[in-house]
Amino acid sequence: MPLQSRALRAFMVVAEELHFGNAARRLNISQPPLSQLIRRFEAELGVTLFVRSTRSVHMTPAGELLHQWARQQAADETGLVRHLQQVSTGDTGTINLGFSSSVAYRLLPRLLGAIHAQRPGLDIILHEGHSLRLIDNILDSRLDIALLRRPAATSFDGLLFSLVETEPFLVALPAGHPLAQSQRISVRRLHQQPFIDFEGSTAMYFRERTRSLFAQYQVRPNIVTESAMPTVLALVQAGMGLALVPACAHVLYSGEIEYRPLAETNPLCSVEMYSVRKDHEPSAAVRVLEETLHHINRPD
């Protein structure tokens, strides 16, 4: 096609120089072959591109239109190449990021803040849900990656789970509760205490964790009701009972609820956060997100 030939390059040089001799020198050819090349190009297009005289060269309206079009094509091509390079390095792109509710208390703001500061061209689309639903959405390719608590009962082929952070359980108590006089609270002191537990369908991980912890220490709290955060903490604030919550939740109801760490160092006294995605080579944008997660959780 004429517009994909080397003649277009020759036309652009002549259009810039408006002088066949200067254009020929830039193209490293002699003037007669250049003139012949432009005439053949005009014949192929069926238009006159230049008005020539012994003293000057001017573009015709058709020549000016072609020059404008070619410059725009070059700009678009440059922009496309730049965009492709940015996508390949993770500087731009879109990530569908799933997260469970407790992620929003501390980790998510830090992650989004770091990405916005370092890679403002990345577009993060957020999807909140409980862990099992998020995992299903990863499997269905509706999410690229998710941050969640991993229920012990889950085992899926083709998924890559990576530990992001570990944080302690805190005992959440209504303000003024007698146990709040202690700097640390033993799990055994929760025996027979009114307790707000986690609901199995929406907070399976936390429910599994608290039940396992109580079973290991043979503790039987008086379970008043079951719910999910932040409702669990709202019920604690209302004085209905105590609860075990991840440390990140202490930002909620901080004026109305007392938070105390557990005295024991048992692994069940802490909770874990995972990232999960399909177990294959991720996009550059997802790699950037994973690297940012690692960076913001790196010990100082």
Image (tube, rainbow, N blue to C red):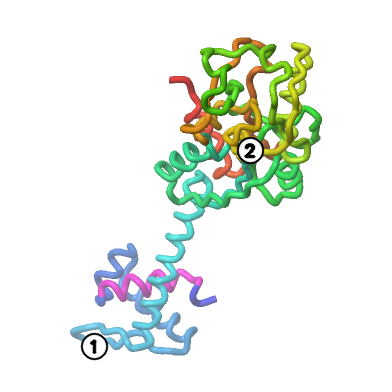
The label on residue 229 is 2
Residue 276 % position (x, y): 67, 36
Q: Amino acid at mark 2?
A: Met
Stretch of the chain drawn in magenta? 4-17
Q: Is residue 85 visible?
A: no
Quadrant in the rendering for residue 174? top right
Q: How many marks?
A: 2
Percent position of residue 6, x then y: 45, 69
Q: Is residue 116 left or right of residue 149?
A: left
Q: Nearer the viewer, residue 137 or 251?
A: 251
What residue appears at the point 35 percent right and 78 percent down from the top-left corner? 35
Q: State the CA–CA distance, disc 2 to disc 1.
A: 83 Å
Closer to us: 247 or 183: 183
**Viewed as shown, does residue 132 lie left or right of 107?**
right
Which residue corresponds to mark 1? 53
Q: Position of residue 4 (x, y in %)?
A: 50, 71
Q: The C terminus is located in which quarter? A: top left
Residue 54 sits in quarter: bottom left
Nearest to N terminus: mark 2 or mark 1: 1
